[in-house]
Image: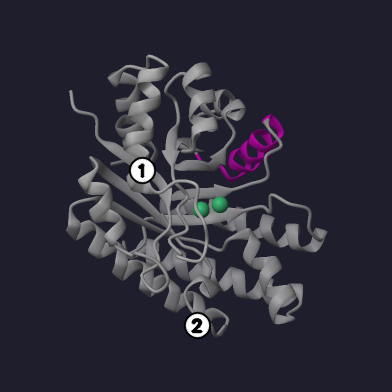
């Protein structure tokens, strides 16, 4: 068996980064699947024009995802409203929380309309800030997250969540909301950047998760976890930001560490293929 590799959460930016060339490099290193999740408008454009900037950003992302697919990598495209955007817009552009609430709800509604047309595959990143911020900003994050989860139920789409890491509590808080909304298929609700210690609880409650593909995290998971998660590079695709891992480095890292920890091909197949197929329903 020859293992194929997946990156279950990455970013793509043809303006300031490599764009679809990521897919070429990944394919040359036995990659088969990437989920590209939207960044923030200022990662692409210098001028901020509110809703128009989000629309333009999604256009760029969708076009680039098509190119990635043409390279021969199974490519899914998701767009969201990153919880960090709330702080950035208020701090940098001097807007109030009401402005951001209005903007973020419009963006999510727009993304949901693209999902129902089959252009976007799901919504992400949405969630909560992983750092301390003002309570009204967390409140907006929560509204946006719950709106995305409601769309996940109504449109039957994938949601990729960026959350704080309060271990079991983070998972339980999400599970409370997901149950209240009434989402039956929880596999399509994905915890991004999960900690290895959160994985058993996430799995037991029926959700999916991605682990950051850097050595310390992979070592911990290979030592302690069954193959019930996926791997992400969370590659920012911006030549100005440093990244710890790229999508095309994941296969080599995984192969080398799997030898060190005596992880078999079945395990690698589960985290790179089977779990990806079930979370992303391929
Ligand atoms: Zn994130
Ligand atoms: Zn990300």
Quadrant, the C terminus: top left
Residue 195: % across, % down: 59, 33
Residue 199: % across, % down: 55, 28
Quadrant, the N terminus: top left
Outermost top residue:
262
The picture quadrant where one finds residue 165 is top right
What residue lies at 38% left-to-right and 34% top-to-bottom? 253
In the depicted view, which residue is nearer to us: 197 or 135? 197
What residue lies at 25% left-to-right and 59% top-to-bottom? 68
Q: Is mark 1 on a helix, strand or loop?
A: helix
Query: Is the distance from the Cβ of mark 2 to the nearest ligand 2 atom less than 8 Å?
Result: no
Residue 29: % across, % down: 24, 42
What residue lies at 32% left-to-right and 46% top-to-bottom? 248
Please say whether residue 153 is visible from this viewpoint. Answer: no
Identify residue for label 2. 52
Residue 170 in magenta stretch: yes
Do the residues under discs 1 and 2 have CB atoms within 8 angstroms? no
Looking at the rendering, the stretch of residues picked out in magenta corresponds to: 168-183
Please say whether residue 42 is visible from this viewpoint. Answer: yes
Number of the label disc, if any, that sits on residue 181: none
In the image, 183: left or right of 70? right
As drawn, 227 above or below 183: above
Number of the label disc, if any, that sits on residue 249: 1
What residue lies at 49% left-to-right and 52% top-to-bottom? 243
Magenta residues: mostly which secondary structure? helix
In the image, 156: left or right of 206? left
Q: Is mark 2 on a helix, strand or loop?
A: helix
In the image, 107: left or right of 62? right
Q: Which of marks 1 and 2 is in front?
A: 1
Distance in Å between CA atoms under marks 1 and 2: 35 Å
């Amino acid at each position: 068996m020859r293992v194929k590799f997946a990156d279950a959460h990455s970013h793509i930016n043809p303006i300031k980064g490599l764009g679809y060339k990521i897919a070429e490099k990944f394919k040359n290193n036995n990659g088969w699947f990437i989920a590209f999740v939207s960044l923030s408008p200022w990662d692409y454009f210098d001028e901020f024009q509110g809703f128009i900037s989000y629309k333009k950003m999604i256009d760029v992302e969708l076009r680039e995802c098509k190119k990635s697919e043409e390279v021969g990598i199974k490519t899914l495209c998701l767009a969201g409203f990153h919880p960090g955007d709330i702080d950035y817009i208020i701090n940098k552009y001097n807007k109030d929380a009401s402005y951001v609430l209005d903007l973020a709800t419009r963006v999510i509604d727009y993304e949901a309309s693209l999902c129902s047309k089959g252009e976007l595959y799901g919504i992400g990143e949405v969630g909560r800030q992983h750092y301390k911020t003002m309570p009204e900003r967390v409140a907006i994050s929560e509204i946006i997250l719950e709106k995305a989860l409601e769309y996940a139920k109504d449109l039957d789409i994938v949601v990729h969540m960026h959350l704080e890491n309060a271990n079991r509590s983070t998972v339980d808080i999400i599970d409370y909301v997901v149950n209240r909304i009434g989402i039956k298929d929880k596999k399509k609700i994905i915890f991004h950047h999960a900690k290895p210690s959160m994985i058993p609880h996430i799995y037991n409650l029926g959700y999916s998760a991605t682990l950051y593909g850097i050595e310390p995290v992979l070592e911990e998971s290979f030592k302690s976890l069954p193959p019930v998660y996926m791997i992400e590079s969370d590659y920012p695709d911006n030549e100005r930001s440093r990244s710890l891992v790229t999508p095309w480095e994941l296969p080599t890292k995984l192969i080398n560490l799997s030898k060190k920890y005596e992880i078999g091909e079945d395990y690698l197949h589960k985290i790179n293929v089977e779990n990806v197929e079930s979370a992303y329903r391929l």
